Amino acid sequence: MSEIIVEGRNIVRDYHVRGGVFGKARTIHAVKGVSFKVEKGKTLAIVGESGCGKSTLARIITLIDEATAGELLIEGQKVDIARQRLTPELRRKVQIVFQNPYGSLNPRQKIGDVLQEPLIINTDKGAEERRELAMRMLKKVGLGHEHFNRYPHMFSGGQRQRIAIARALMLNPSLLVLDEPVSALDLSVQAQVLNLLADLQEEFGLTYVFISHDLSVVRYIADEVMVMYFGEAVEYGSRDEVFSNPQHSYTKTLFAATPRADVESIRARLARRRAA
Amino acid sequence: MPLLEIENLVVEFQTASGPFRAVDGVSLAVSEREVLAIVGESGSGKSVSMLAVMGLLPWTAKVSADKMTFQGRDLLALSPAQRREIIGKDMAMIFQEPMASLNPCFTVGFQIEEVLKEHLGLDRKARRARANELLRLVGIPDPEQRLSSYPHQMSGGQCQRVMIAVALACNPKLLIADEPTTALDVTIQKQILDLLMRLQAEHGMALIMITHNMGVVAETADRVIVQYKGRKMEEADVLSLFENPKSNYTRALLSALPENATGDRLPTIGDFMIEAEAATAVKTPIMEPPV
Amino acid sequence: MATQTVSAEPVSLDPSRRARLAEFWYYFSENRGAVIGLAVFLILVALAILAPVIAPHAPNAQYRDAVLLPPFWAEGGRAAYALGTDAVGRDMLSRLLYGARFSLFIGIVVTTLALTGGIVVGVIAGYVGGWIDTAIMRVMDIILAFPSLLLALVLVAVLGPGLTNAMIAIALVLQPHFVRLTRAAVMSEKNREYVVAARVAGAGPMRLMFRTILPNCMAPLIVQATLSFSNAILDAAALGFLGMGAQPPTPEWGTMLAEAREFILRAWWVVTFPGLAILITVLAINLMGDGLRDALDPKLKRS
């Protein structure tokens, strides 16, 4: 069994909503005791609909927010950002790519600076070396050196997502959290970005936590699948297990709701329509 | 005679960097009781052409067409007042963002009744009854109470149902749905699509479904138009489009679906578009803010 | 496809800055008033800089043979004193030219003071939030609750009259506007994903506040700064008129008005020309500010 990169044990996250003058304070349980484990080089997909807590979980794994309870282990090391200061060592191990490529890049920052920022903050590399590294990463994600001095608004959605991926990889992380990385993209661009992610995973031995609501994408990219519903992991297993033999009724509903684009189902639908 | 007939529609926008052609010579026709899907990616002009039909484009847009008729009436020759009589009554539209399409300041009931008052001139009591009936029709539980709630008190799926109720208020002949389920979860998407298809069949209206999702096309359409960069790439009935796509672009779209993946890699559009097509595509400017 | 579109463009090293400037000018120049304002402002700046060269006389030189002379076109005017002289025989034109220096100086210093102070306080209030935010904003509310000129007067009375103290007082009075604007902009920007992305890259609070968030809040601040510029000139003139600003014989426009008060009926030119100068300057800068708003605000929405 190969190295475990990230492990969550019974992770809980509660939000306290302060009551107003008249309202009562409430507690919202966004994540209710979720456990998972991802091996090096594998992809765990977390599937669910809006409000199921998958993005909250992503923020906890990326060490942006702390968990209310439970343990998070990164490369076997226990991490608790509520109690200890986040070291640059730890920071560089986990990186994230967000869903919205239009919001995740600073509009006043040139692409070159976007890529160099993590290096400036976390390393003491010289300006020349930083530039070199950023340029190399830009080429790796399929952009050219002519893009180095441009601002984000000059790029299409797919290109911006490539830049966001390049930024996440600048610190050589071992774990990359992908929060709906392709759901804001057009179909043909989505295919390109998925291919890029597959290539990068192979080249750098990356481990992915892939958050998505799109089952067809998950089926394509995941090794293991976790289905979340109202903060709970209702289904967790290998991709083939989950897709061929879903256990939980919610998973079944989810599969049934996904539109089918194969010729057989279209024929069946047209036949029903004619009969009606 | 087709319900809506458009020939050679061209829409141009004036921008800081010169005119930009968003729709370039699109022709289409929809007959009564037909479900037509217009598929395309962003920048394909699929929404713009329908907004042009509705007359909802900003003043920077220049619309021209050889022919644009609805029930035999020439839409281009209508005065704005005459046009308003048709829009919302015989021809209605629903949009992608249900939350943003409803006015947050007014109750759901008020917004439905407003349409009824404007187009049908019903009295207060009849309006209330009809609004109630409409909410029941679109499957909102406890409609009597829901009429007095505000949009922010409802979920996205419910807001979209209300939007559909507003659109259906005057029994339109044609309903244009612009990405009606893109902002919704899959399970809610399924419910809304089922609802739309049921209403379409029951009311015998024509439906134009604008979408980028091939799955939605497969689940709803009779006939499909594929658009790319403002041009029509292909028009076919739904079965032959999926079974035997004629244009390279359609083929590329279908094979880019992750569920159709055969090997390790997803085919991308570059693997399909022949040089000449790609070259013409590059020449059209991308729709982005002027720099 | 878009990938190919962009890579097909010719390679250029830094096309963005010039393109942005061109875009800025496109929107700015659509507002004709703004362009006129800009032109007038530039002329004023040039006149102020070149005052020692073009002014026919020294600003404080008194010509005993030419007391209260009317402008040259009026009866009794002399060509040597183009806009006439004041009660102690100083050339009005020269004083107005030197006065432009003072007004622009006041505008720049006050705006810079208020802007920097307002930005620092506002960014902290917006970013940190909590009781610090509440405390800062209540203090700002208190300052805003006073009529601005009255507060400035009180401050000058405490600090002692003089141009420097007047500028400090005006800067303090103008500052809350900047604090409010900055705070609002920071609060809307701080939850954007690019800020979270910078945090994930390891950026500390200082870097997040001033390098990541602040540049994205500048557009409304620049507009407010131009408007404050004219406010500062106006307030300084008012303080000068009340004898609390620049002290005579400084050729400051407001002070000039104050000195000329008793001659309003006898010599219209001693009050009219400083007044006109203030009016034109403030009007030009306000017009310019409108144009800046047009040019910068849509930019905010698009990016």
Image: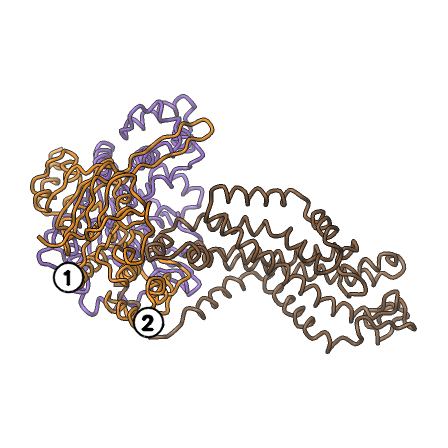
**Residue shown at 62%/64% (left/top)?**
C36
Q: Chain of mark 1?
A: A
Q: Secondary structure at mark 2?
A: helix
Q: Which chain is purple?
A: B
The kind of residue tagged 2 is Arg
Height in image: A106 above or below A73?
below
The kind of residue tagged 1 is Glu
Would you name the residue on which mark 1 appears?
A202
The circle on residue B97 is none
> Chain A: what color?
orange
Q: Chain of mark 2?
A: A
Q: Secondary structure at mark 1?
A: helix
Would you name the residue on which mark 2 appears?
A131
Percent position of residue A147, x then y: 33, 69
> Chain C: what color?
brown
Percent position of residue B188, x then y: 24, 37
In contact (CB < 8 Å): disc 2 and disc 1: no
On-image quarter of the C terminus of chain A: top left
- Mark 2 or mark 1, earlier in chain: 2
Question: Hey, which residue is sitting farthest bottom in the picture?
Answer: C53
